[in-house]
Amino acid sequence: MSEERDVMEFDLLVVGAGPAGLSCAIHAKQLNPELNVCVLEKGATVGSHILAGAVIEPGPLEELLPNWKDNAPEVCVPVSRDEIRMMSAQGSFKFPIVPPQMNNHGNYIVSLSSLTQKMAEAAEELGVEIYPGFPARMPLYNEAGEVIGVRTGDMGVDKDGNPKDGYTPGMDLHAKLTVFAEGARGSCSKQLVAKYGLDAQADPQTYGIGIKELWQLPPGRTEPGLVMHTMGWPLDNKTYGGSFVYHLEDDKLAIGFVVGLDYEDPHLEPFEKFQEFKNHPHIKPLLEGGEIVSYGARAIVEGGWQSLPKMEMPGAALIGCGAGTLNVPKIKGVHQAIRSGMEIAKQFHEKASAEGFDARVREGAIGAELKRVRNIRPSFHWGLWVGLMISGLETLFAGLLPYTLRNRADHSALKKVSTHKPLTPGNRDLPPRDRLSAVYFAATEHDEDQPVHLRVEDTNICVTRCAEEYDNPCTRFCPAKVYEMVEVDGAKQLQINAANCVHCKTCDIKDPYQIINWVTPEGGAGPNYQLM
Amino acid sequence: MKVLVPIKRAVDYNVRVRVKNDGSGVELNGVKMSVNPFDEIANEEALRLKEKGVVTEVVVATIGVAKAEDQLRSELARGADRAIHVVADQDIQPLQAARILKKLVEDEGIDLVLMGKQAIDDDANQTGQMLATLLGWPQATFASKVEIEGQTARVDREIDAGIETLEVDLPAVITADLRLNEPRFIKLPDIMKAKRKPLDKRELGDFDIDVPTLEVTETRPPSGREPGRMVKDVDELIATLKDKGLV
């Protein structure tokens, strides 16, 4: 479709209303109220597509919005106590001390969907234009090859790509600087990294998948402010990951599980591991009799210092988890995301371009924090025990030891199905029964009559090579059961239930042949997270 | 012809509604709120009538909390000309809403009210009918097609036996059913323009809503369903049913 598109001009255009994008918009307006700043968000509302534990370190937020507590997020509980446990199938061992990175004294448990809504209110008060329901479909370039903005997605296209009644073409937004703050594995960011070779000097980016449930429990069971993390069971020692259990107010509990996407076993189902974990004798009594309020999943960026791509290109910059500023050992990304947003706003204010932003990040607080812990996450490639040992050493020497461990691409870590025995399903009887009943609590919604937004380049591979080599891992790693192998007229074929998608991006990352491309569906489609 | 489109801020249709732990109502804390979908359809119909040249002005109005301004802005972005916000922090029941709307109709010199047949939160399906009665106007509810010629509206309604066509004299109250139309997508530049469209705030105190109201004594979720059990074959099914004394 090559019709004339409306064009709008801005000084600063931000893609993604997460903590990074909103901090950029807010700080840009604080530095220069005259600026014309626009934020695009693919979710139907700000916060509807964002999900995190989330324990936040409030420093950078306080710097950005000193009065943030006056309009506090719906969930905002000061951390009262930290607990770290090593799990075995029946028991658990509580660490006598909490490693310094994981000490949460002075931090807050918040709902990130609620925090971003509050940040959006602050941004709008400063005159930022925020447009939820409008995904950035693709970056736009000028003839010199510079980024000049983005095109938003078309609305009202049927599943075969034809315009329906009410078809509304997307429009072009141009800006002096476009800041991509799309979160882990952003669909535009991915194109930009490829086009400008932003990862040429970096290791491949690595990720984890985080699955979270919010529970309403019978009265009196929680200890508001208690932050518990676990390692070990039900994951084997070769697989990186663990759980988080955060006690909120009003008898609510945030519980979740993270699995490093560099896992090797093609049989592994992150969703099932989470459910098994919930049924551990130490955890189950907490949840029994309660009900699920919300469910969701999201890829988490884990590559850290050595995987950080170049964060600038002509006309644009990458910030937050879209670049990869999250601090894995701390299990925190929000404070770094906010810093990166403020940093690009300062950069734009001083230089009116992205040039020099990358050095600024690496040499500043963001880079220092990442560099110090750079060897911790990759040390777990050798398993849990070696990882813990190296992490201890690295922490002791504050990252000053003169070596850097390398990262490898997650999809390349998957081993062939022939090398691993099938896993035996664990005992579990707490809800949800399966992924479909879980997805119901994500309140995800996509018009069925639109093009499938999970583009599989070659579906023949699914029935031939992939079935044989990996037994179609997409049917297992997806936390929303989007991918199914079905039999049609006696032959297997891939069925994509795109309407279930919760926009976590795991398939785009972990698919061993890298033929799944996640693109933005119609604006406003996707999960509707509440208090996540 | 001036049209009034009353709209209501309601819990979004995608949200799984939860009853509060103390049974005092449903949880609205942190819950996504949207325009009641039937009201979007009503506004769309008013806009189409305007595009046909039948209507000259579309006024959207709501009665509700300060944040309900978001919903008014969204309907202004769809194309309404201006908005009226009757700010109310308390729960407003249908008869009270109808009385407020009656005064707005009179104050604004409205010729036609187009509104949703019901709101998806309380499903009361009363305000339109009550408003018509209070105004002494004809009403055509559950409209699936609206045609206006001169001072007459022809309205199709989907009823059990098929389609019923009514003719009502204007001014009238017409309430919109699901299949009346499919509301247009809101365009980005229109959201921006909507921020500058006129929006009048009015105090609840300007209206006489002193009428007997219903008292909600308790809200509770439906009782849970017994889990099902898979049986291997017909014999087991029959045996189980016999066991339970059901056959």
Image (cartoon, coloured by chain):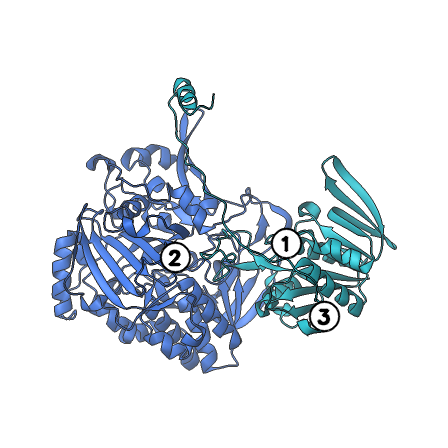
Chain colours: A blue, B cyan
Look at discs 3 and 1 and give the one toward the viewer. 3
- Identify the element where label 2 is drawn: helix
Q: Is residue A211 left or right of residue A519?
A: left
Density class for disc 3 (Cα within 10 Å; few <14, some 14-19, many ≥20) is some
Look at discs 3 and 2 and give the one toward the viewer. 3
Q: What's under tag 2, amino acid-wise? A: Lys
Circle 1 residue: B119
Circle 2 residue: A190
Q: Is residue B37 visible?
A: yes
Res A206 quadrant in image: bottom left
Q: Give the residue displayed 80% in from the left and 42% down from the top.
A: B165
Look at discs 2 and 1 and give the one toward the viewer. 1
User: Which chain letter matches label 3?
Assistant: B
User: Which chain letter matches label 1?
Assistant: B
- Above or below, B109 against B22 in this view is below
Q: Position of residue B62 (x, y in %)?
A: 66, 64
Circle 3 residue: B207
Q: Give the residue displayed 39% in from the left and 62% down from the top.
A: A250
Mark 3 and mark 1 on one chain: yes
Q: Nearer the viewer, residue A37 or B33?
A: B33
Q: What's under tag 3, amino acid-wise? A: Phe
